[in-house]
Image (cartoon, rainbow, N blue to C red):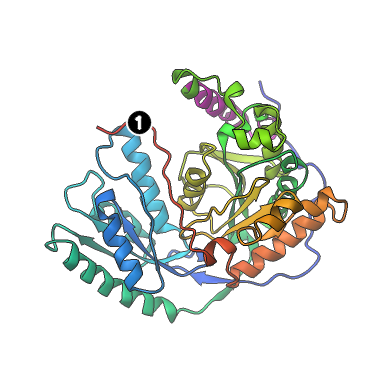
Amino acid sequence: MCTIWKEPVGEVIKLDKQYNLLGFRRPDGKIGIRNHVLILPTITCAVQVAKQITQLVDGTVSFVHQHGCAQVGIDYDQTFRTYVGMGCNPNVYGVVVLGLGCETHQARSVADEIKKTGKPVETVSIQDYGGTLTAIAEGAKIAAKMVQDASAQQRVTFSFDELIIGTECGGSDACSGISANPAVGAVSDMIVDQGGTAILAETTELIGAEHLLADRAVDDSVAKKVYQVISVMENRAIQMGVDIRTGNPSPGNIKGGLSSLEEKSLGAATKAGTRPLQELIDYAETPTKKGLVWMDTPGHDIEQLTGMAAGGAQIVLFTTGRGTPTGSPIVPTIKIATNTGIFERMEENIDMNAGTIIEGKETVQDVGNRILDEIVSVSMGKKTKAEILKQHDFGIWRIGPTF
């Protein structure tokens, strides 16, 4: 029997000032902090057409991928869920679902699920429209109208209890677990204490720290699931002939001063703050409870970022000790350096510096407060570095082979 979490560690954090967040209210009542028109290709064959539409129509975004066909079973289900989740994300005003016509993941099926949110959704099939050029013209025409309608929408005020933040670390180093990750944990606690939701991901990078999270589970079923997903992740690696506890961390992590996966995991787990673990959800699923939520994702940066975006996160906090340009086509990604050196070296990609904690200039809570201020600024329209550089990364966690 697991030890079940009863009370949060420390007092509930009271914010020291009034925050006014601004966002876009969707027909289903959810709030978005961006107003994108998404050109969503459901099959790799449609990716280039989607790219052409985004080049023609300002205000649209899309992504490149190799999925959408020759997938079966739970692998098919997960890709479908990810497509639908991207379209349903509240940062998206409307969607043009673009298909070829003969693929496994039918564009109309994806569109029908997204339409349940009440947002504008249209479908274009390359085969039905007679080829690439006609499909581009039709998709661009639809998208242009959506962008114009989206531009007329006014922002409204909202509070932290409507916010879902994703948390992530990539290119970790020896400073991650004592600077940026704990600072993100402080933000997680503040968001949760205000009634919001924080997603912890990266199951691979929680191996060795699972007992700490299981002890914070709200009930025994959640605690048991913690151990279950860790076991499944390890067994996947064993089936491929790898003991993941010795096969990680990556060369970059080792260069950054991390000696083992457990050391990395103990640092990664600090992003979860100190509040109770409410539930554990599958990849690209939307949280059903507020508070701290664990999404079962791999450690792959782009795949986990995509999973959280498909799960409804409006913003992601991404810590890095080695540096990364990573971003999402629909979710602003705030990059936070774990050390001042990497912040100064890659300032064009990284938004904030938590290396001041290492230098003794700020406390973990000080940096957490700065990050919270940045979340508010981004919600009101400030662009992150990844957004400015159009770092529209996308990748789906694959379960099985193609057929």
Q: Residue at position x 56%, y 27% from top?
A: 230
Image spot of residue 287 (x, y percent): 52, 47
Q: Is residue 223 above or below residue 24?
A: above
Q: Which residues are magenta?
A: 211-235
For residue 295, which quarter of the picture?
top right
In the image, is 369 to the left or to the right of 146? right
Q: Is residue 12 above or below residue 299?
A: below
Say which of 219 and 90 sits in front. Answer: 90
- Crowd class of label 1 (few under 14; some 14 to 19; many from 20; radius 10 Å): few
Say which of 128 and 292 sits in front. Answer: 128
Main SS class of the magenta portion in the image: helix
Q: Residue furthest bottom?
A: 152
In the image, is 317 to the left or to the right of 70? right
Q: Residue at position x 49%, y 54% from top?
A: 312
Q: Is residue 172 above or below residue 41?
A: above
Q: Does residue 148 appear in the picture of this structure?
A: yes
Is residue 57 located in the magenta-colored stretch of the structure?
Answer: no
Say which of 131 and 70 sits in front. Answer: 131
Q: Does residue 96 appear in the picture of this structure?
A: no
Disc 1 marks which residue? 400
Image spot of residue 270 (x, y percent): 71, 41
Residue type, numbered disc 1:
Gly
Quarter of the image for the N terminus: give it: top right
Q: Residue at position x 49%, y 53% from top?
A: 309
In the image, is 24 to the left or to the right of 63? right
Q: Is residue 226 above or below residue 156?
A: above
Is residue 232 located in the magenta-colored stretch of the structure?
Answer: yes
